[in-house]
Image (spheres, rainbow, N blue to C red):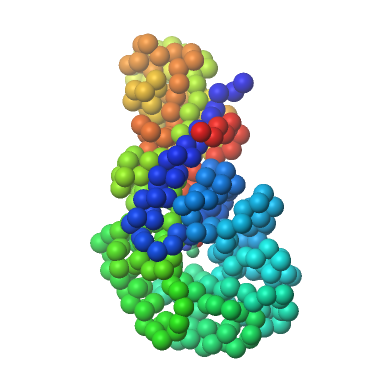
Amino acid sequence: MRPLTAQIRLDHLRHNCALARALHGGRVLAAVKANGYGHGALACADALADCADGFAVAFLEEALELRAAGVRHPILLLEGVFDAAELAHVDRHDLWMVVHCPEQIAMIEAASPAKPFRVWLKLDSGMHRVGFGPQAYAEAYRRLLASGKVDAVVKITHFARSDESDSPATAAQLECFDRATAGLPGEASVANSAGLMLHPRARRDWGRPGIMLYGASPQSGQGVGSGGLKPVMRLSSRVFAVRELGAGEAIGYGARFVTDVPTRVGLVACGYGDGYPRQAPSGTPVAVDGRAARLIGRVSMDMLTIDLTDLPDSGIGSEVELWGDRVGVNQVAEAAGTLGYELLCNVKRARFVYE
Ligand SMILES: *Cc1c(COP(=O)(O)O)cnc(C)c1O
């Protein structure tokens, strides 16, 4: 069997959730969108049943998958509904939804639900992606309640730069939120992982941790274990072939790496078809039998090449950690010019082992 394995440590997931809960206080809406950031949404929701007060997914189909598997917790649709027909499912399956635009309010006004909807009304406090602007917010809030189709409105906003601990942008967004929602009753929710780890003033009724649950810091420069987080996914494979090359030999597509000294090259069963980033340059860290080593040459679809010259005891069958405990997913992401978020979401063709 091809040795690429994603170990998913559910005890680490629970540890990270407990940390989020302790930091933020109040209630925890655990983000399990995008298949639990690539970890398996259902397995993660089951493991978090006692820690999380609810789950956040992006859209209806993701929520229905959890409901079909028996998840009874509140589930919030972070993008809300895309058309009026989805409201029937929201009603039948007891889902909560974000409302971010007037069109969604019109759909609610026209609906005939069996029981009132629970709405999280989105304020655009400065990210300028979705949400009602500060001038339009109170009117949208009143319109929802006046529809008679909504029993409660939770006030929500989202930060654009909360991973930057020194940026004034988050404080400005908070100030905008407090001003726009002043006098409107109901619970509030503003903090994603970075918000709740780095901005104590952003703690409200509901925290919305995502990436931190999976053990990766929301700050891209941070290594394994930062903030007390434990990495949930450990992606590993094995060396399946070894080549001895002389000096001056090119390796792989595009001859991107040329040996300058005699080099022992290990072939590893993992490539961009598995979600390892093709953009990762020579020098990107890996761990071979627990020791530091590096990627050399272009990543292929099904395999990648590493330098074993300084690891004479390692060879065919040696275990290679792509990311996890010794190599932080954020370290690989930084080398490849992306975020741990993207790498985790993209893992496929691996054997998932839950423990
Ligand atoms: C994904 C998401 C979160 C979680 O964000 P993290 O940075 O992963 O903690 C929180 N709120 C909203 C609206 C989201 O879309």
- Vertical order, 32 against 95 (above or below): above
Q: Which quarter of the rendering shows the N terminus? A: top right
Q: Is residue 258 visible?
A: no
* Residue at left offset 72%, top offset 75%: 114
Look at the image and tell me whether residue 41 can be seen: yes
**Observer-nearest residue: 220 or 9?**
9
Most foreground residue, 214 or 284 = 214
Residue at horizontal 65 percent and vertical 81 percent from the top: 149
Provide residue 5's location: percent of width, then percent of height: 53, 29
* Residue 259, position as x, y percentages in the image: 38, 20
The x, y position of residue 187, in whole percent, is 45, 74
Name the residue rendered at 42%, 50% in the picture. Answer: 17
Left or right: 138 with respect to 166? right
Pick out the residue farthest to the left.
166
| Residue plotted at (53% across, 72% down) | 120
For this rendering, which residue is in front, 281 or 214?
Answer: 214
Relative to residue 237, is residue 187 depicted above or below?
Answer: below
350 vs 235, left or right, is right
Residue nearest the viewer, comparing 141 with 151: 151
**Percent position of residue 89, x then y:** 71, 65
Judge left or right: residue 172 versus residue 320.
Answer: left
**How many numbered marks have been drawn onto this rendered protein structure?**
0
Q: Quadrant of residue 11?
A: top left
Residue 347 image-quadrant placement: top right
Q: Is residue 244 above or below residue 48?
A: above
